[in-house]
Image (cartoon, grey):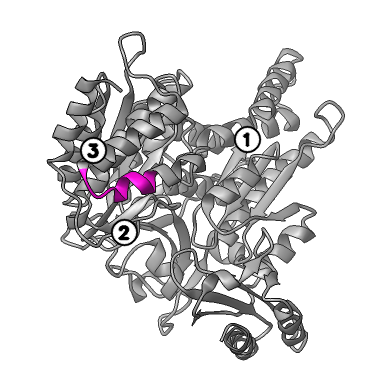
């Protein structure tokens, strides 16, 4: 690193002194916290993103300024790798180091050291870095975006491009498209969604003269960017009757009593919904539109909603995709296509049983989207969801190529209208509609809606695919969370020795009982999850396991 580069970093870092006593750690959600304390962090992640781009041959990297479902006074920043996925885990420790460096001098020395280790060169021979910046609707987003631009620009020859107010999944999609050499504007994103949605609508089987009846979908936009973007998208969609509430334009506050996180945790109506909506199909997006849950109000007197969470959405997607694969039969070079479903230990046991009854390959991954995404990528088609409504479907490149050539083959043989051709065309359209970079509430809504129309199903019929087992979660404060070590799927505890046997003997006392413990990633607590055939039994099992944690960990 030459003197000019060092001077550039020292000069710009003096604009963003680090706040005292704030220690940050880069997790699945990137860095998050009180927006007033984040300028220096965002500036430094700007530097990291420019270095990431240089390391990967000047590929475009994305930076998203959002705190998702957190309150409006918070904000955050996360990096999108050129693949559209999350920042590579190998770079997370470096992110932590530079975010917490106490002075400009320490910051420069950490950067210099890291560049040597990673062999990152800045100079005339190399093309500069390119970083695309997006933000959600939070008022703090604009000044934080400026800090990110200054961070990117402090690495000489680097370019930061502000692509405006976006949902998180839009930014990831655009970065992925750009690096694949495809059209990558926000309009291209919308066009991709509407074209593939209409393609699936056109492939819905209609018998005789029954014209498909389209019922209204009520959308809760969490008073965030998702509500505004789904309004923009609505114009280009026929066959979808949407009423969008909580767009943030009517004075509602982001994530306050609204949004997917609120509805999923509290199982109550978001603001703006009431008894007049009984029986209607409703969907809730979260603050940056990367999570989606559905719900309906069973009766005028009910305080709680009937929730259709990530597990229910996953089951609907799996059912539809399996139906298309069954039509194709054993046809991939004589081998069955590999469809896999990935869940975490928190997935309701009733959903896992249902998916296994469908004959699906169900595997478990550690909690956290990046672990689910990695496992799903091992299949021809991998579907993953967390109960909170974050998830997507991944199609392997080789499987997409196979589908496209199969589609062409059938057309060439004059079998364009055959059931097989329709099934292949549906799978190709799903691979285009669904956001393969990250979970995306907008593409998720469109896929749920088209599948319900395809099956001629109501939200009530969808809800009875299976009935969730009652469950309970408890947090137990402990002196040292690292004393608990679990298997990689987090379904069993390996340490302290003997605790798993004790948990098993509690589980055996309850019909359909299941329980597990896992240490929190951020605080000295152990999380207990339990489910059983009745709420009373689930509560009792959770309490007994919590007691075991206390007695084993002191």
Q: Secondary structure at mark 1?
A: strand
Instruction: Locate residue 263 relative to residue 505 in the image: left or right.
Output: left
> Is label 3 or label 2 in front?
2
Q: Which residues are magenta?
A: 95-103
- Give the mark nearest the N terminus, 3 or 2: 2
Disc 2 is placed on an element classified as loop
Mark 1 or 2: the one toward you: 2
- Residue drawn 21% across and 41% down? 104
Give the residue displayed 46% in from the left and 49% down from the top: 445
**Disc 3, disc 2: CB below 8 Å?**
no
Instruction: Answer whether residue 50 is magenta in the image.
Output: no
Quadrant of the rendered structure where residue 187 is?
Answer: top left
- Residue 190 in view in this figure: no
Crowding near pointer 1: few (<14 within 10 Å), some, many (20+)?
many
Asked if 548 appears above or below 459 in the picture, the reply is below
Q: Which residue in the protein does label 1 denote? A: 395
Q: CA distance from mark 1 to mark 3?
A: 33 Å
Report x, y in % for residue 363. 71, 54
Q: Nearer the viewer, residue 64 or 459?
A: 64
- Of the image marks 1 and 3, the number of the one nearer the N terminus: 3
Residue 392 can be seen in this image: yes
State whether residue 427 is above or below residue 446.
Answer: above
Query: Image quadrant of residue 291?
Result: bottom left
**Place of residue 20 in the rendered image (x, y in percent of width and height, measured from the top left):** 20, 59
Q: CA distance from mark 1 to mark 2?
A: 38 Å
The residue that disc 3 covers is 148
Q: Residues within 10 Å of mark 3 (few under 14, many from 20)?
A: many
Specify which label sits upstream in the sequence, 1 or 2.
2
Q: Which residue is mark 2?
A: 23
């Amino acid at each position: 690193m030459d003197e000019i580069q060092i001077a550039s970093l020292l000069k710009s870092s003096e604009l963003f002194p680090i706040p005292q006593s704030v220690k940050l750690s880069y997790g699945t959600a990137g860095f998050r916290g009180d927006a007033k304390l984040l300028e220096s962090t965002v500036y430094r992640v700007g530097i990291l993103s420019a270095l990431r781009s240089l390391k990967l041959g000047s590929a475009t990297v994305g930076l998203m300024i959002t705190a998702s479902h957190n309150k409006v006074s918070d904000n955050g920043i996360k990096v999108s790798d050129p693949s559209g996925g999350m920042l590579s885990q190998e770079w997370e420790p470096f992110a932590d180091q530079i975010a917490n460096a106490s002075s400009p001098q320490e910051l420069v020395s950490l950067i210099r050291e890291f560049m040597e280790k990673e062999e990152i060169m800045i100079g005339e021979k190399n093309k500069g870095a390119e970083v695309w910046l997006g933000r959600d609707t939070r008022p703090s987003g604009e000044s934080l975006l400026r800090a990110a631009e200054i961070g990117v620009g402090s690495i000489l020859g680097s370019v930061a491009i502000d692509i405006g107010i976006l949902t998180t999944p839009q930014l990831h999609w655009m970065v992925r498209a750009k690096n694949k050499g495809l059209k990558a504007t926000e309009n291209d994103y919308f066009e991709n969604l509407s074209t593939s949605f209409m393609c699936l609508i056109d492939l819905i089987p209609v018998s005789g003269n029954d014209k498909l009846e389209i019922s209204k979908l009520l959308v809760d936009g969490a008073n965030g960017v998702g509500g505004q973007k789904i309004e923009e998208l609505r114009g280009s969609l026929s066959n979808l009757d949407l009423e969008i509430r909580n767009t943030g334009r009517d004075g509602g506050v982001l994530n306050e009593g609204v949004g997917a996180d609120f509805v999923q945790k509290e199982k109550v109506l978001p603001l703006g919904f009431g008894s007049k909506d009984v029986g209607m199909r409703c969907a809730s997006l979260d603050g940056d539109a990367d999570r989606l849950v559905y719900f309906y109000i069973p009766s005028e007197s009910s305080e709680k909603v009937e929730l259709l969470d990530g597990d229910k959405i996953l089951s609907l997607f799996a059912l539809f995709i399996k139906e298309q694969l069954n039509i194709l039969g054993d046809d991939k070079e004589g081998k069955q296509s590999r469809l896999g479903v990935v869940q975490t230990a928190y997935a309701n046991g009733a959903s896992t049983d249902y998916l296994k009854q469908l004959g699906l390959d169900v595997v478990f991954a550690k909690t956290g989207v990046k672990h689910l995404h990695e496992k799903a990528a091992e299949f021809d088609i991998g579907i993953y969801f967390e109960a909170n409504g974050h998830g997507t479907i991944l199609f392997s490149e080789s499987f997409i190529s196979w589908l496209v050539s199969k589609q062409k083959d059938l057309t060439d043989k004059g079998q364009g209208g055959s059931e097989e051709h329709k099934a292949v065309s549906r799978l190709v359209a799903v691979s285009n509609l669904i956001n393969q970079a990250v979970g995306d509430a907008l593409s998720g809504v469109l896929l749920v809606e088209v599948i319900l129309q395809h099956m001629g199903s109501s939200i009530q019929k969808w809800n009875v695919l299976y009935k969730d087992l009652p469950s309970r979660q408890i947090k137990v404060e402990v002196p040292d969370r690292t004393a608990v070590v679990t298997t990689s799927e987090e379904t069993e505890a390996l340490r302290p020795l003997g605790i798993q046997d004790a948990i098993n003997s509690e589980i055996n006392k309850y019909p359909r009982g299941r329980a597990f413990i896992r240490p929190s990633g951020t605080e000295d607590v152990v999380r207990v999850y339990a489910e059983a055939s009745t709420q009373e039994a689930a509560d009792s099992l959770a309490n007994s396991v919590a007691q075991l944690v206390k007695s084993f960990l002191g």
